[in-house]
Image (cartoon, coloured by chain):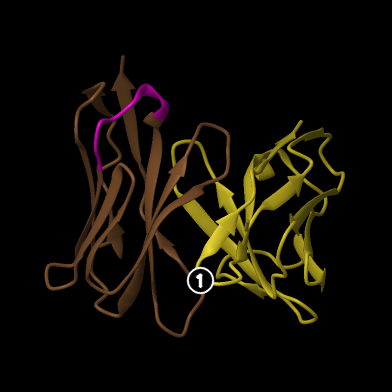
Amino acid sequence: QKEVEQDPGPLSVPEGAIVSLNCTYSNSAFQYFMWYRQYSRKGPELLMYTYSSGNKEDGRFTAQVDKSSKYISLFIRDSQPSDSATYLCAMKASGTYKYIFGTGTRLKVLA
Amino acid sequence: GAVVSQHPSRVICKSGTSVKIECRSLDFQATTMFWYRQFPKKSLMLMATSNEGSKATYEQGVEKDKFLINHASLTLSTLTVTSAHPEDSSFYICSARGPLEDTQYFGPGTRLTVL
């Protein structure tokens, strides 16, 4: 079993839809949870950073962490074609710099 | 803030040659930088962790003599792919540990093609 599981997609949605992206994990030591957006042939861009459980909102993006279920989510409201990219979840434990990445979910927002 | 650059963005070389990739933190000092490799439609694979002024720590299965890492200053780390072969063709991405948060900021990546 992989430490981090993420559906690779592709996920296609119409413009304006609410998008839900998810990752599950097995290591209960993970405390830091990140979401990155990666456009084709570019480096990942940090979108959201969350420590421990709870919700965090930034504009159209909301990150949720449920440590009891070992499940994290990223919601995108009012999705736009420019949101079309691969979304990577990443997580790490305290006391280490090493990130564990999901495989990424390819999102396509159709105009 | 927290901008990381990489140079070159793309390189094509002949088999057997060595290629150096630079990673710079432009507006912050990074004591720790990371080098990743990414295959098409795959996630990032950590190759090594680079600490300023000390030897890099390589992940299991990564040849340290083939992938030379130098982190000589707080804003620059370099990855040299020595005696490159076609199987080394990949997308190489560096990241730097952020200045305020315990997170990583990524460079734009370098696409290496070995003929």
Q: Is residue A52 above or below residue A73?
A: below
Q: Residue at x 75, y 79 (%)?
A: B55
At label 1, counting other C-alpha atoms closer than 10 Å, the crowd grade (few under 14, some 14-19, many 20 or more) is: few
Tell which of B91 and A52 is nearer to you: A52
Q: In screen coordinates, is B47 left or right of B19?
A: left
Q: Give x and y (percent) for residue A49.
A: 39, 62
Residue lying at 44% horizontally and 43% vertically, measured from the top left: A37
Q: In which quarter of the image is residue B89?
A: top right
Q: Does the magenta stretch include residue A80?
A: yes
Residue B102 drawn at (x, y percent) = 50, 73
| Span shown in magenta | A76-82
Per the image, label 1 sits on a secondary structure element best described as loop
From this view, report whether residue A82 is shown above or below residue B83.
Answer: above
Q: Residue B99 versus residue A41: which sits nearer the camera?
A: B99
Asked whether, in this view, residue B95 is left or right of residue A105, the answer is right
Location of residue B84 with respect to A90 vertically, above or below: above
Residue furthest front as drawn = A59
Q: What residue type is labelled 1?
A: Glu
Look at the image and say whether residue A48 sits in the magenta stretch: no
Instruction: Chain B: give its colour.
Output: yellow
Q: Mark 1 points at which residue?
A: B101
Quadrant of res A1: bottom left
Q: Residue furthest bottom?
A: A95
- Whether B115 is drawn above or below A88: the answer is above
* Chain at tag 1: B
Q: Residue at x 50, y 67 (%)?
A: B103
In the rendered image of the structure, the colour used to display chain A is brown
Q: Which residue is drawn at 70% across and 75% down?
A: B31
Considering every residue shown, the one lying at the far top of the view is A111
- Residue A68 percent coordinates (x, y): 12, 73
Q: Quadrant of the C terminus of chain A?
A: top left
